[in-house]
Image (cartoon, helix red, strand yellow):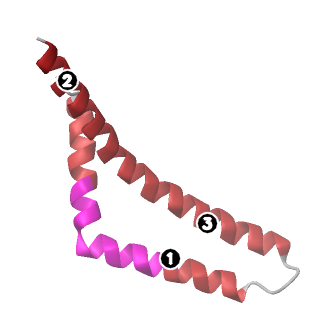
Amino acid sequence: MINQDILDKAYTAERLMNSADYKDVCRWVEEDIFALFNKVPLGHDETLKEVQQLSHGFKLFKERIAKYIEIARYEAQLEASNDEEY
């Protein structure tokens, strides 16, 4: 049986990813990060590094949400293949 915690995370993540508000917020954050990149003056390596870290952190956040769904699908496939064996 699939772990309930995994299912809860997957359902919540899927609802979130399909939400128009979430999509809007993601687009706005991505636009803000892009604008920050464009505002970094040449030679300001520390500022550029900070913007890159922000960008990478946001990317990791989005990947983690997708991972919750992926894990639940994988667990469901494992359970289905185990059921077929019996």
Quadrant of image for the N terminus: top left
Choose the circle earlier in sequence order: 2 or 1.
Answer: 1
Q: CA distance from mark 2 to mark 3?
A: 41 Å
Q: Amino acid at mark 2?
A: Ser
* Residue at 58% over, 77% down: 33
Report if residue 17 lies within the magenta region: yes
Residue assigned mark 3: 54
In the picture, the disc for residue 20 is none
Which residue in the protein does label 1 denote?
30
Could you tell me if the residues under marks 2 and 3 are in contact, i.e. CB atoms within 8 Å?
A: no
Q: Disc 2, disc 1: CB below 8 Å?
A: no
Q: CA distance from mark 2 to mark 1?
A: 40 Å
**In what element is the residue under mark 3?**
helix
- SS for callout 1: helix
Please give the name of the residue rendered at 25% of the width and 34% of the height, measured from the top-left corner.
5
Q: Position of residue 35 (x, y in %)?
A: 60, 86
Q: Which range of residues does the magenta coloring cover?
A: 14-30
Q: The residue under label 3 is which amino acid type?
A: Leu
Q: Residue at x 38, y 75 (%)?
A: 25
Amino acid type at mark 1 = Glu
* In this rendering, position of residue 67 left or right of residue 84: right
Mark 3 vs 1, N-terminal side:
1
In this view, 21 is above or below 53? below
